[in-house]
Amino acid sequence: MKTAGYPNVNIHNFTTSWRDGMTLNAIVHKHRPDLIEYDNLKRSNAHYNLQNAFNVAEKELGLTKLLVNVDQPNEKSIITYVATYYHYFSKMKALAVDCKRIGKVVDYAIEADQLIEKYETLASVLLQWIEQTIVTLNDWQLDNSLSAVQNQLQAFNSYRTVEKPPKFTEKGNLEVLLFTIQSKMRANNQKVYMPREGKLISDINKAWERLEQVEHERELALRNELILQEKLEMLAARFDRKAAMRETWLSKNQRLVSQDNFGTDLGAVEAATRKHEAIETDIGAY
């Protein structure tokens, strides 16, 4: 019940120091400034001051009014009366402390509920992404050309390096969040939250393992298909080169066969005959 700093209040004893009523008003104002307009009080108006303090204390605080002679205050009566102030404000302070403690408990409970809701939401979103990604990876059809497979492999690598890493971070953050929730609830003597089946950390880890298995199978299929398409591309290129060479050979020999001038002597005719026989031999080789 400190009154330091209040003007016209200087407690030396339990008689004259209380005579003008300023001290009693200061005590009430210190704890309940809404009940006393202390700055409007005048030390010279002792009777008003005392009655003001008595009336406020009785009406607002439930403290029995003290019947005292202003000119000759009784020390024992003053001590007894002031003690009622002390007990009242001590209880009020204790109640305030209890209310503050209860308020903290309520705040902790509200915070825990908010964190639980956050965990449930984030877990649902992550699990949904995992399942949808598994479906997408399984549903990919391998294209039947080298460039198309290269594009598919590029898209797969983009998924692995761009889309997947943030989700891995989210998975780790979920573990930290759940640990935080459970630690706060233990500290607040609350029943510790445990996610329902399907949203446990172990469930999320299992789903992640399935994703990585499907991902591995998808990558293996893409790389095998890439090797196959590269071989087919090489074979096609080799065939094109041979076809071009054969086309050149055909054009050249077609001109020879179409000639009807075999010469005017036996030697020229025999030479032309040998050329035709060589062409027939080449054709037979194919």
Image (cartoon, rainbow, N blue to C red):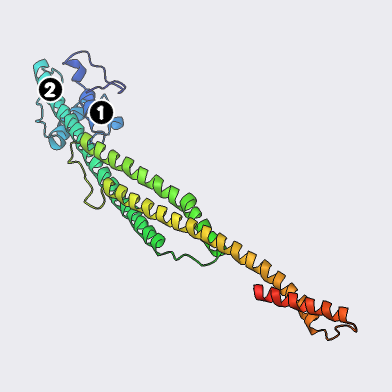
Circle 2 packing at 10 Å, graded few (<14), some (14-19), many (20+), is few
Query: Which residue is at the front of the view, 209 or 87?
Result: 209
Query: Mark 2 highlights which residue?
Result: 83
Q: How many numbered marks does the figure carry?
A: 2
The quarter of the picture where residue 1 lies is top left
Residue at (11, 16) in percent of width and height: 75
Furthest-top residue in this view: 12
The quarter of the picture where residue 253 lies is bottom right
Furthest-right residue in this view: 264
- Say whether residue 108 is left or right of residue 222: left
Mark 2–mark 1 Cα distance, whole angstroms, equals: 16 Å
Q: Please, is residue 33 above or below residue 205 in the view?
A: above
Q: Please, is residue 42 above or below residue 133 in the view?
A: above
Question: Which is nearer the N-term, disc 2 or disc 1?
Answer: 1
Query: Mark 1 highlights which residue?
Result: 30
Q: Is residue 91 visible?
A: yes
The residue type indicated by label 1 comes to: Lys
Task: Give the x, y percent position of residue 269.
Answer: 84, 81
Residue at (40, 49) in percent of width and height: 167
Quarter of the picture containing the C terminus is bottom right
Task: Give the x, y percent position of residue 230.
Answer: 56, 60
Furthest-bottom residue in this view: 260
